[in-house]
Image (tube, helix red, strand yellow):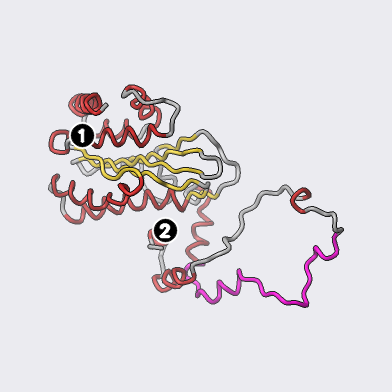
Amino acid sequence: MEKLGREIVTIIVDEFGLDEFLKRISDPFWFQALGCVLGYDWHSSGVTTVVTRVLKEAITPEEHGVAVCGGKGKASRQTPSEIERIGEVFNFPESTIQSLCYASKMSAKVDNTAIQAGYQLYHHAFFLAENRKWAVVQQGMCLQDRTARRFHWLSEKTQTFVVEPHNAIVGDVKHDNVLDMTSSISEGCRKASVDIAKERPEKIMRMIVPTSSSLQKSLEAWLPKEWNPARSCSMEFLSMPRNINWKTLKAVYEFQPSNYEELLSFKG
């Protein structure tokens, strides 16, 4: 697979250039077809991890002018250090290297946090070209139904990291009730998130943590005992998490983010 992958990359780069290679990598249909050509199962989520690993081994930065950083699981955490190493090979200035590390970080942060559909990232591959352009292929797993979703990014198409930044998102399951903070219609939610983050944590705590009293009863006390709310109510809704990291929220308040991207990029 590596030998074939190497020849394919060589031909594309020589005949069409680095931009076209990154463009094809960020196309989910072409990427899937490449996996088939390399001999991997077309219907398996493993095609993402296998193809990127094969390309990482097959590509020589000095020869092809492009490199693959990151990978599956623990390998994904090595992405920043690998970008720094490749940046030195391509003779990038420090500012460019840090900008590329930021792009890697934000693409992962967006797909793990800003898009809340239940898919936790376990694979992150950052394609870096010597012309300073990049592409990202990463994948998340939904533990509830064991389905995977692949996210494709292309630097030329990414005008902003927080407003519809993807080149493509592909998966077998479409979920009806999700929170997509990158959607263009979520601008109000993004602004509200920043406004809340800039409030004192004590005020937020008073707003979302209900006060309870042993003398206070709920409406359920007057409902029939045989009433089952699970069967009577079918409305889907989003709820606050049970546990909130107040320490991080305090740090965000002290940081005072000026926009949603700054809020999302905050560590924690």
Q: Amino acid at mark 1?
A: Ile
Say the numbered circle drawn on residue 207.
Answer: none
Residue 264 lies, with reference to residue 203, above or below; the image says above
Q: Is residue 124 left or right of residue 215?
A: left
Q: In the picture shown, does residue 152 fall above or below 263?
A: above
What segment carries the magenta color? 196-223
Task: Name the quarter where the N terminus is drawn.
Answer: top left
Counting from the top left corner in percent of width and height, residue 80 is at: 26, 52
- Element assignment for label 2: helix
Judge from the rendering whether residue 144 lies leftward or rightward of residue 104; answer left or right. right
Where does label 1 land, which residue? Answer: 59
Element marked by disc 1:
loop
Q: Name the residue located 47 percent from the left edge and 49 percent from the top edge.
A: 182
The structure residue drawn at horizontal position 36% and vertical position 26%, both measured from the top left corner, is 40
Q: How many marks?
A: 2
Give residue 61's quadrant in the image. Answer: top left
The local crowd at label 1, few if under 14, some if 14 to 19, many if 20 or more residues have their Cα within 10 Å, is many
What residue is shown at x 42% (from left), y 38% (from top)?
A: 150
The residue wearing badge 2 is 264
Residue 202 vertical position relative to residue 103 in the rendered view, above or below: below
Q: Which of 8/15 is in front?
A: 8
Q: Amino acid at mark 2?
A: Leu
